[in-house]
Image: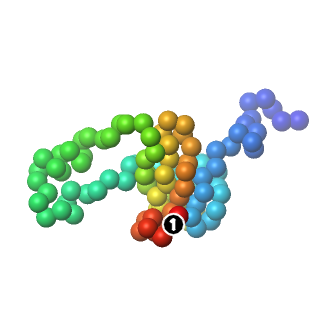
Amino acid sequence: MRPTNTPSIDSMKILNCPINGPRPLQEFHFGGELRPNPLDRKDGADADWADYVFNRDGEPGVKREWWYHIPSGTWFIAERDNVTDQFQRTYLYGAEQTDG
């Protein structure tokens, strides 16, 4: 008999690693929202850099985020609805144009 304070397998949160398939969320590390780097622009000013470092878009909705799969050492992008906390899809960085 399972102790009452142990989560069931049905309640475990699963994230789909683009390399290894569905894995428990405990195997991943959140890396932050995917945002354009102001240093990639030729006209990037100090104000743009300060905005990048200190400000975040807090709007509810689907966000593109960096996630790291610890066992495989893989960084990838996950699209997650921050209202429902549900993952929509995952893919390797650069593959978003080819992934439907």
Residue, x 58% and y 67% (percent of image)?
Answer: 19
Q: Residue furthest right?
A: 1
Task: Looking at the picture, tell me which residue is in the foreground, 36 or 13.
Answer: 36
Hey, which quadrant is residue 94 in on the image? bottom left
**37 to the left or right of 97:** left
Residue 67 in view in this figure: no
* Left or right: 42, with 77 as reference point: left
Residue occupying the point 18% across, 46% down: 50
Say if 7 sits above or below 66 in the image: above
Residue 69 image position (x, y, % from top left): 54, 59
User: Residue 80 at what x, y percent from top left?
Assistant: 50, 47
Whether 44 is drawn above or below 95: the answer is above
The residue located at (42%, 36%) in the rendering is: 60
Q: Nearer the viewer, residue 38 or 89?
A: 89
Q: How is the image coloured?
A: rainbow
Residue type indicated by callout 1: Asp
Disc 1 on helix, strand or loop? Answer: loop
Instruction: Tell me where residue 12 appears, x and y as whole percent.
Output: 68, 43
Q: Quadrant of the N terminus?
A: top right
Q: Is residue 63 in sight in this rendering?
A: yes
Q: Is residue 39 above or below residue 48?
A: below
* Residue 13, image quadrant: top right
Q: Is residue 94 left or right of residue 26?
A: left
Report the number of numbered marks. 1
Residue at the farthest front position: 100
Measured along the vertical axis of the image, is residue 16 above or below residue 4?
below
Residue 58 screen position, x and y as percent? 36, 37
Mark 1 — residue? 99
Question: Alpha-carbon neighbours of circle 1 within 10 Å: few (<14), some, or many (≥20)?
Answer: few
Q: Residue at x 26, y 57 (%)?
A: 37
